[in-house]
Amino acid sequence: MEQVTDHILAAARKVIAVHINYPSRAAQRGRTPGQPSYFLKPSSSLALSGSTVERPAGCELLGYEGEIALIIGKPARRVGLEDAWSHVEWVTASNDLGVYDLRYADKGSNLRSKGGDGFTPVGPGLIAADSVDPAQLRIRTWHNGALVQDDTTGDLLFPFARLVADLSQLLTLEAGDIILTGTPAGASVAKPGDVVEVEVSAGDLTSGRLVTRVEEGTTPFADFGARPRTDDLQREEAYGSREAAGLAAPAPILSPELKAKLESVCTATLSSQLRKRGLNNVSIDGLSATRPEKRVVGLARTLRYVPNREDLFKTHGGGFNAQKKAIDSVNEGEILVMEARGEKGTGTIGDILALRAQVRGAAAIITDGGVRDFSAVAAMDMPTYYANPHPAVLGRRHIPWDTDITIACGGTTVQPGDIIVADSDGILVIPPALAEELADDSIAQEREEVFIAEMVQQGHSVDGLYPLNAEWRAKYETWEAGKANG
């Protein structure tokens, strides 16, 4: 097997890196791109296996990312998907190193944070691209001997041929150019003295382990440029989670205590409290529920469908599209809310994807469109709120377009992170900033209504009682005090 040599590195005029490409990484980051996006790394960042990389003086967060590198064998300019892979000559391992301490200064370019000398080791062995199926490669990374990344290319967001074809639309990929194709979940931070190894394999074929040792830099940054700077957000991004970074978990938007409060009151009460605050357009209207007896509280995740256009459905409708990405990234207790424009002439969710959402722990699915495989969906424990049953697939009227954006559903606006409360009376969208006081005031209102109902039951007129006037409020406060002391 051929080896990556200085000659091969010298032939690389461009090093192009893809941002997010693995579903596992997208789920970890909490965002799934609809199209691939890229950044450039200087060819001077390339290094061979066995080399050392310096964590620059004053930097804390040298991140490593095991990746599959494609080496272009013949120029590619405006090539199609069917021809793109033939322009790749070699496949090997790479490590997309970078310091998160300088991300703030790059304004998105990644030049300083990921462009340092030695920040792109590749190798050691080369796998002939024409000897492998690009959808059946495996990438593994070891940190100080522990396996930390292990994934395959079977369900990439953007298959390798698509990357080559897409890039070639605007620029010429030249022989020797290197494309880093994204990293799976598990990337983290290496410290001086650590060893990071990356391997790409396809059956019996392997790149061998790409070995990089980390050492501490000794030359500080000068005053005339950006200095290293970091914060807890960068630490979380670098390590992959707050827990891995040793940071305290942030207070949840929907704490167990707040969730319990909202579950204890009905939507009718919440609606009246929202109206008192001037919020009248916060209900998702016109839907039925498969489990109307359930009261559901959860955070919104969003998915938008646009009207079907055949040429756009070809690029957005198939494969791991936005619908599947949304289903596959919904988390425990979240509610997937779909914008289907009130279109009733096709399904927007069916039994398999609804089951996947239930398995992932989704609290509910809400769509202002149709539901396929209705009997199976209705039999699930997870509630689905829908406009109507319909047997047609979504491609009849819809293209799944985007996720985790502001959408419209059932006549109101829903943003990711809004709190959804649903029961047999309806579905409400609650701004998170208002939720705590709204819940407390709703609980107080329902206590008053218990008193009022008792008084009505005893034969009193509702005049002055509902709502409470001063006289009746005094009686209520006495009643409430008695309940508290009793």
Image (cartoon, grey):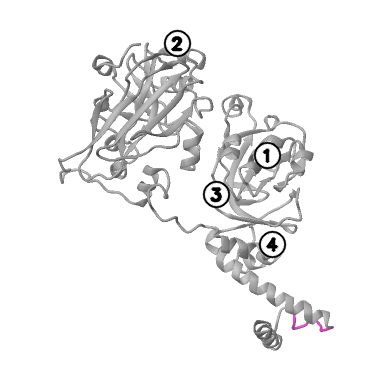
Sequence-earlier tag: 4 or 1 = 4
422 sits to left or right of 141: right
Sequence-earlier tag: 1 or 3 = 1
Judge the density around disc 4: few (<14), some (14-19), many (≥20) Cα neighbours within 10 Å.
many
Sequence-earlier tag: 4 or 2 = 2
Q: What element carries label 3?
A: loop
Q: Mark 4 points at which residue?
A: 267
Q: Name the residue under label 1.
A: 355
Does 465 lie within the magenta span?
yes
| Residue numbers of the magenta segment | 459-466
Sequence-earlier tag: 2 or 1 = 2
Q: Mark 3 points at which residue?
A: 416
Residue 312 sits above or below residue 430 on the image: above
Q: What element carries label 4?
A: helix
Q: Position of residue 140 (x, y in %)?
A: 42, 28
Camera-nearest label, 2 or 3: 2
Q: Position of residue 467 (x, y in %)?
A: 71, 78
- Residue at the limit of the structure toward the front, as seen here: 145
Q: Quadrant of the N terminus?
A: top left
Kind of residue indicated by mark 2: Asp
User: Image point 78% across, 79% down: which residue?
Assistant: 454
Camera-nearest label, 4 or 1: 1
Camera-nearest label, 4 or 2: 2
Q: What element carries label 1?
A: helix
Camera-nearest label, 1 or 3: 1
Where on the picture, by quarter, is residue 139? top left
